[in-house]
Amino acid sequence: MSDDKKQENQQEINELGDSQASAEQKEAAPAAPLTPEEMIAALQAQIQEHQDQFLRAKAEVENARRRSVEEVTKAHKFAIEGFAVDLLPVIDSLTAAMADTGADSVKMKEGIELTLKQLMSALEKGRVLEINPVGEKFDPHRHQAIAMVPHEQEANTVVTVLQKGYLIADRILRPALVTVSQPK
């Protein structure tokens, strides 16, 4: 609980204690009957106090709502920040590869493989997972069949993957493009 809330709660407790003490004092002392004007003034003071409390509560709710909206807006705006930070080393590696003027294709291939590993690592950190379903049963929610081919495997089994698919937090980002075995 915030310090402001604690202070407000303590203040309310103190006010309740004060109002109870003044009520007890009024009961102990012989109460003079209030005139209608005094009753009206007391009731108007109570109305004013309740209106003030209502307006304060309404303002507090509005401030909480505004803060929530701002936090959600910031969360949406900067949600990709962590993922982008993970991709920066991949960009650095690709930039270095483009700047290299050497003609050694073996080194170039090694550099590309390392860059691909960096990219796959960054995707995994962002909860993007690869779908490579060779040998699995065809699932229309995760795979997109391009063709059916005769094969020795059981019918409707993925034979080859033409393009890998990807999941993000158990949601299909892109289905895998596959060929599927025909029924015999």
Image (spheres, grey):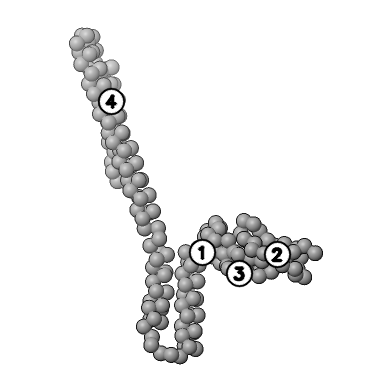
Q: Earlier in the sequence, mark 2 or mark 3?
A: 2
Where 144 falls versus 162 (above or below)?
Answer: above
Residue 50 circle label:
4
- Whether pointer 3 and pointer 4 mark residues with C-beta atoms closer than 8 Å, the reply is no
Q: Nearer the viewer, mark 4 or mark 2?
A: 2
Q: Earlier in the sequence, mark 3 or mark 1?
A: 1
- Could you give the CA–CA distance between mark 4 and mark 2, rounded to whole angstroms? 75 Å
- Could you give the CA–CA distance between mark 3 and mark 1, rounded to whole angstroms? 19 Å
What's the residue at 51%, 64% (across, down)? Answer: 128
Q: Position of residue 50 (x, y in %)?
A: 28, 25
Q: Which residue is mark 2?
A: 148
What's the residue at 38%, 62% (across, down)? Answer: 81
Where 113 falls versus 145 (above or below)?
Answer: below
- Could you give the CA–CA distance between mark 1 and mark 4, rounded to whole angstroms? 54 Å
> What quarter of the picture does the C terminus occupy?
bottom right
Q: Amino acid at mark 2?
A: Met
- Whether pointer 3 and pointer 1 mark residues with C-beta atoms closer than 8 Å, the reply is no
Q: Nearer the viewer, mark 1 or mark 4?
A: 1
Q: Name the secondary structure under disc 2.
A: strand
Q: Name the secondary structure under disc 1.
A: strand
Q: Which residue is mark 3?
A: 162
- Could you give the CA–CA distance between mark 2 and mark 1, rounded to whole angstroms? 28 Å
